Structure formats: structure tokens, C-alpha cells
Amino acid sequence: MKSFYLIKPYLVEKKFFILLGLACLITVDFLQLFIPRIIKWAVDDLTAYRIDSITLLTYALYIVGIAILIGIFRYLWRRCLIGTSRRVEEGLRNRLFDHIQTLSASYFDKVKTGDLMAHATNDIQHIRMATGMGMVALTDAIVLGTAAIGFMAYINVKLTVFVLIPMPMIVLGTRFFSKKMHRLYGEVQGAFSDLTEVVRERFAGIRIIKAYNRQQEAASKLEAVSKDYIGKNLGLVKITGSFFPMMVFFSNLSLAIVLFLGGRQTITFTITTGDFVAFISYLGLLTWPMMAIGWVTNLIQRGKASLDRIDKIIQTLPEIDKRPGGVIIKQVRRSVVFENVTFSYVPDVHESGSFPVLDSIDIKLDFGKILGIVGPPGSGKSTLLSLIPRIYDVSRGSIMLDGVDIRKLKICDLRSRISFMPQEPFLFAGTIRENITFGNKDINDRDLIRAAEAAWIYDTITSFPDGFDTMVGEKGIVLSGGQKQRVALARALLIDSSIMILDDPISQVDVETGNAIIKTIRSMAGQKIIIIVSHRLSALRFADQIIALKMGRIVESGTHGELMADDKYYAKTFRLQEIEEEYAD
């Protein structure tokens, strides 16, 4: 199994505990085998009328002592083996999460969040069961089964051979059912991913669902996906529901053989009554290993299907690491240059017949200057911004920082030089302080307050009873749109970076607050490269350079005065917005 490499390091790391656990498990198995021997001695002595109360008490104390030892060693093997499986679960989940964080944004454009959640929960749980109880069941099937057969053969070889006649049928049945179970487990886990995604999406959008009275439609969608999940499970149950009864049937068939043949041998005194009772006891012990064969097959097939699904993610490489860089720029001091940059979300865009999102973009922005970007919705503004921190990589052309292609830079160093505020501010379900500092405990209160004041959110924060320690709820639900936007802006302003990228930073605030924020941004001119996208064109009139995008191409470029003189898209939109603002006043 190629995907086994995923859990091998964790098993090797816990090798001592695994060996100790297996030793304790095997000890428990052998201790259980002595109980039927004690019962045989007691039954033989009772049938021969040569036993007294003291001897019976002695036999009883033997069993109590063995039971105590079994309890101790059973605790130890559970602590070692089940504990190891939990460590495997922890390590694999951490590895999966760490790897997912390295994947490019394009990966998340194609994969549902529900799928990733199912991988991180359900699939890893199945792997844990396979490495924990799967190992236990497999050991019991081998050790306890073999030893029980040995003790049975010691009593009577001929009877043991007859009892084992159904065994080949169990092996053949296991091989037949295991192939079907592996395929069906994969389908079941895929359906579980779909179900998880539908539930997650409906909970995330519960407010819009209630606002539009679409509760019935949401419930119907969930019901349809749930029925598909149940259908897949019922298909699996048809297989497992046939498999386990088959195991029980062959176990009871062996018991029937013992009762008939063993009973006859007891009548003819070929074996003693104690041997007959002990033989049935050993057969009872053998039933669990026979059942364990089926259970371990179940666990391993489910775990293998899950491991294959996890491995598929681990084998996915981040696109931006195809050409890993190693050049380090301590500080950007000269310029950001776009050289004939073309980008498309679709590979081989020209062959597919579609148009690139950005096409032949040429921009040069010197250090300390401010670039404003305008354009109608869908013109490629936000996409252009996302290329600078390499959230996406350019399809053609290059982006240069101080003359160095950003693909030659270490990604962590590149992004540490950039403060980025996206168009849709995202807040985590923590406090305002945690959202602004982003978990950086080295940020002191002075810098925190400075960033909040620069984003014109400080007065709002201090008006809350808990101030910076106010809980914002999931996605910042307790804050208004403008407040969330300013918290996200404060997060960007807190970072002392060479490049600041702001995607529509004043779209959700009033004109007065927006002007104050723009004034703050203007005060940073000369200290860093600033790139701003804004639909409110008056916020960009101070920029050193303004470009207008349309259908992914630069259709205008210049200062505010130059673009107004050209009397094209920028000038017409600017005048229209002036009229709208005057009318609003």
C-alpha cells in the first residue's frame, strides 16, 4: 500500500510503545487460554467425585488471579496501542493541515471546504481505527486463533480437523467481500464529504436563507444529499450485512460439529468430560479471532480508502512552488514593475477559446509612489493585486521587485514585505485585538492603538464595554460592514512593510470617514509603495499614477489631471460620481 508512508513515521516514533502494547496483548491472549484448562481440571474432578471445597476454592482463586492479570495487561495494551493510534491521528491531521496551507489559491477554487473538513475528521478517524483496533484485531486473529487451535489439537487432533473444515470458506469469503468493501467505503466517504459541504454552506448562509424564506429549499437540498449518503451506506450494509452473518454461520457450524462429534467421543470415553467442556471453551475463544478476521478486514479497507484520499491531497503540490526561489530582498527600495503580465484562471487559455483575466499589463511604480487602479466590475483589479504577493502566479510575463523576478524570491520573505487588505475583509471568531494583531503576541498596545487610530476605528472600539477584547463572533458578525472593513485595514496598517496593497478600503464607510482614511494613507507617501483599488474615484485623485482597467487591459494611464483631460472612462465616471455625491448631500 503506497499511502502507508503517511503513517509510517508516527509508528516508527512510537515503536517502543507498540512493541510493549503487543507484548501485553499477547500475554492477555495466552492468559485467556489457561482458563479453559482450569475448567477442565474442575469438571474432571467433579465427574470423578474426587474434589473437595478447598480444591474448588483453589481453582476459583486461579481464575480470579488470571482475571486480575488480564485486567492489568489489558489496560497496558490499550494505553499503548490505542494511545499510539491517537498520536497517529494527531500527527496526520497536523500534517494534512500544514500541507493544505501550502497549497496555492487555485486549489481552493476547485475543492469544496466540506471535502477538506471530511478529510480532516472522518477520514483520519478511520485511519486511527485501522491503526489502533485494526492492529489489535489482527494480532488476536493470529495469536489467539493459532494458540486456541493448538490447545484444541492437544485435546484431540481429529476433532480439531473437523472443526476447522469451515475455515477455508471464511478466507475465501473475506477475499471476495474485501474488494467490494474498499470500493464502497470510498463512495461512502465521498458522499460524506458532499453532505458536510452542504451542511457547512447552509449554516454559513443561514441569515440569507432566513431573509429570503428559503428554509424549505435548504432543507430539501440537505435531504437530497442525505438520501444519497444513506443510499451509499445501505449499499455498503448489503455487503457488510452479508459478511458478518457468514462469519457467525461458520462459527456456529463448527460448534455443531463439536457437539455432535465431541459428544460422541465423550460418550465413548475417547475424551473426558472436562476435555469436552474445555474444547467448547476454546472454540468460544476461537470465535472472536474468526470474527476479528472480518472486523479487521472492515477496518483496514475503510482505513485504506481514507488513507488513499489523504494521500491524494498530500501528493498535490502547490503551483507556486514549481520554481522555488531562494533570493532574499531585505527591503524593497526601488520599484515594482509589471512586464507584459498576462494571467488566466484557466490553463491554456488561448487553446480553450476564452479570454485571459489580465492581458499584457505593463506598469512601473517607483518606491514612495502611490498607484490607483480603477475600472468596472470584473475588469481584473483584484486579480492584479493578488499577483504581487503570489496568491496566484502570472501565466506569462513577470513582476519585478527591485529588478528581481518575484518567482525567484522566497515566498515567506516576499509576503513579509507586503501588507495586504483584500476586498472582502475576513475576521476570525475571536477578539478585535486578536484580529488586528493576527495572533502576534509581540505587538504592544501602543502600536495596536496607533493602527486602530490610523484606520479610524479606535473610537468605535473604545465605545464597546470590552474595548479591544470585544468578541466579534463568527466572521465578525457583531460588527457592521464598515467596522469590519476598518478592523481589516488596521491589521494591514499595523505591519511595517515596503509595499501596502489596499483593495477598495473605503467601500463600506461614509464619505467623511473615507476621506479621513485616505488622508492617513496619503501621509505614508514616500515611505513605501502603495497600491489602491477604489470604486470611489475621488479617493484616488492624489495618486502619482492612475490606471483604468477594462476587460483585463490597461485602457488609460496617467495622473488625475491627465485622465480628466483625456475625457474617457475615468473622467466620465469621476464627473458622474461628483453629481451623485452632490445629489446625495
Image: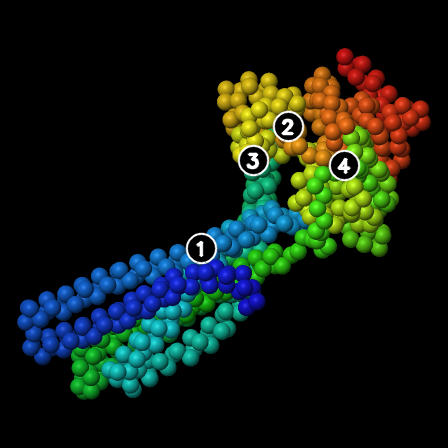
Residue 523 location in percent, x, y? 74, 23
Residue ID at (17%, 82%): 272
| Horizontal relation, residue 35 to residue 7: left or right | left
From the viewer's perspective, tell me whether residue 378 is left or right of residue 89. Answer: right
Q: How far is the residue under mark 1 from the one under mark 4? A: 47 Å
Q: Earlier in the sequence, mark 3 or mark 1?
A: 1
Decide which of tag 2 and tag 3 comes sooner along the chain. Answer: 3
Reading the chain from its start, which is encountered first: label 1 or label 4?
1
Decide which of 435, 401 is in the foreground and name it.
401
Q: In front of the other: label 1 or label 4? A: 4
Q: Which residue is mark 1?
A: 87
Compute the Cα span from label 2 to label 1: 39 Å
Q: Position of residue 253 (x, y in %)?
A: 34, 76
Residue type of the residue flagged with mark 4: Arg
Q: Are marks 4 and 2 in contact (CB under 8 Å)?
A: no
| Residue on which the image places disc 4 | 333
The residue at the point 30 percent across, 58 percent down is 75
- Circle number at residue 440: 3
Q: Is residue 563 above or below residue 82?
A: above
Mark nearer the viewer, 4 or 2: 4
Taking the spot 28% from the left edge, 79% from the top edge, the residue there is 152
Q: Nearer the viewer, residue 185 or 473?
A: 473
| Residue located beneath label 2 in the image | 490
Type of amino acid under label 2: Ala
In what element is the residue under mark 3?
Answer: loop
Task: Calculate the distance from the C-alpha at mark 3 to the C-alpha at mark 4.
Answer: 26 Å
Q: Amino acid at mark 3?
A: Asn
Residue type for callout 1: Arg
SS state under label 4: loop
Pointer 2 local density, CA inside 10 Å: few below 14, some 14–19, many at least 20: many
